[in-house]
Image (cartoon, grey):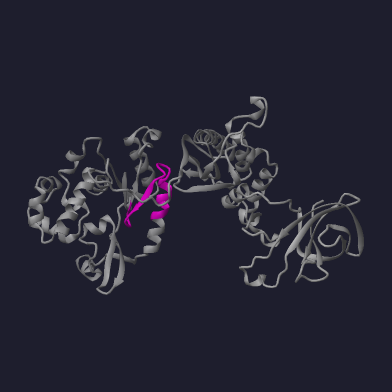
Amino acid sequence: MATKPQDNADGRAEAPFVLVENGAKGTRITAANGAAFGVGARLGQALSDARAVFPGLRAEPADPGADAELLEGLARWAMRYSPIVALDGTDGLMIDTTGCEHLFGGEAKLVADCLKRLRAAGFAVAAGMAGTPALAWALARFGEEAAIAGPGETPARMKDLPVAALRLSRERRTLLKRLGLKTIGALAAVPRAALERRFRSREAAQSVQLRLDQMMGTLDEPLVPLYPPPPCRAFLAVNEPVIDIGGVEIVVEDLLVRICHRLVERGEGARLFRLTAFRADGGSSTLLVRLSRPGRAREAIMRLFAERLEEIDCGFGIDGFALSAEDLSELSQVQTALAAEEAGDGAQSDPRVFCDGIAPLVDTLANRLGAHNVHQWAPVESHVPERAVRRVAVGGALAWQQWQERASPAPRPFRLFDRPEAVEVTAEVPDGPPMQFTWRRVRRLVTRASGPERIAPEWWRADARGVAVRDYFVVEDGEGRQYWLYREGGYACGEPAHPRWYLHGLFA
């Protein structure tokens, strides 16, 4: 479906009014209302020439940036009808409604609903719906006010349209008119070889044939959507506008049931859920819920939405809701309880979501404070402990996958010191574990020890030159406290006679 915004449609008598832009050829008209066209104004005409015909013509400077912003806002609003909406130049939209018509009762009702809402917002619009973008564009600009070409009607609907409906350049339109080809039907009846001989270049003839093929559907014309369509989306149009948060919560619960069921069928989980509420006045509100790990647990996701539903602006009522699941990844189902009723539905069967007790807390904090304010550790390809992790924003897919794929070569302490602290150690010679050590002026006797784990310096780094080999030990004192100590250097040839010992972390 193609829509083309026009002038104000409130029914009042309008004074002739144009928008103008200064350029190398003077002040030219870039847009005009119906009344201005009625008194002889034309697009591209010099303002002085237009005022010579009608001295009372009002003019204001054009603002292309504001126009583009308004059109993009209309594109976001049009996503209530389909997730695939593309900009069509500076004054139109293309909407791929394939598979969405039944949500509005059919194609005719969808077009009527779109026109009704845009007119209520103060726009005068024309719309066309057809099996190809080219024909929809032509019907919106050269057909009836709400023209619809059904399946199989393309040849009949295009034959009486002017050749200007083919989106050709002015030079090629002029040449076709000189050849007596004023309608698309007359042009289509000319053999292609004969048509090519009438043009000065083969490229010009092929451009005309290309537009014909696009309109007839023999050549695809893909749309480039303003926003990539989400892989999983559910839409609900309500008969009576929702005016309170309680009603919004009921609708969101219904949409989540659909989305989570689809995710189970796909065997995937989502890290981002996007709720868009379309208001009756043409505005919209968007609410995002992010998960630190892929999930599809309806109750857990609903709790995150419920905490922030007050951010939705109901205005004079919301009559359409869209919920999409984005940033999907594979999520296998694993039963975590003996009884089926304890394991719950498929959305509650993945241990990565429900066996990790900290995940709900992380999700809650991230959605309250913002994901950029909550951090997690992600692994780095380095055996040196102080370089083995980095801090990233919570919810990063890469961090989660890396932790799943990487197995630690040996136990790591819960607390790692920013800088290792020097200790005095009594140990067996030449490479035995510590027997006792003094840390922060307190002597501790070692009752158990394991190791060593040898970590060599990263020789390819410039700052690794002169750094000695480390031998790490996990030791435990008489009170059950565990420490992570390492010996820098050793008693081998070329190493210091008395190696240095450091405490690098605490286990418990």
Let me know if residue 400 is in the magenta part: no
Quarter of the image where one finds residue 293? top right
Label count reads 0
> Is 94 left, or right, of 258 in this rendering?
left
Quadrant housing the N terminus: top left
> Is 355 left, or right, of 315 in this rendering?
right
- Examine the rendered structure and indicate whether residue 187 appears above or below residue 301: below
Q: Residue visible at 47% across and 40% down?
A: 233
Residue situated in front as seen by the camera: 287 or 111: 287
Residue situated in front as seen by the camera: 90 or 26: 90
Q: Residue visible at 63% across and 55% down?
A: 379
Let me know if residue 82 is in the magenta part: yes
Q: Residue visible at 22% across and 66% down?
A: 45
- Examine the rendered structure and indicate whether residue 494 appears above or below residue 472: below
Q: Identify the residue at the far front of this view.
A: 493
Quarter of the image where one finds residue 306? top right
Residue situated in front as seen by the camera: 332 or 204: 332
- Examine the rendered structure and indicate whether residue 384 appears above or below residue 78: below
Measured as percent of width and height from the top left, residue 251 is found at 54, 36
- Range of residues picked out in magenta: 71-92
> Is 141 left, or right, of 200 in this rendering?
right
Measured as percent of width and height from the top left, residue 99 is found at 37, 36
Measured as percent of width and height from the top left, residue 327 is found at 52, 47
Measured as percent of width and height from the top left, residue 352 is found at 63, 41
Residue situated in front as seen by the camera: 480 or 360: 480
- Examine the rendered structure and indicate whether residue 505 appears above or below residue 460: above
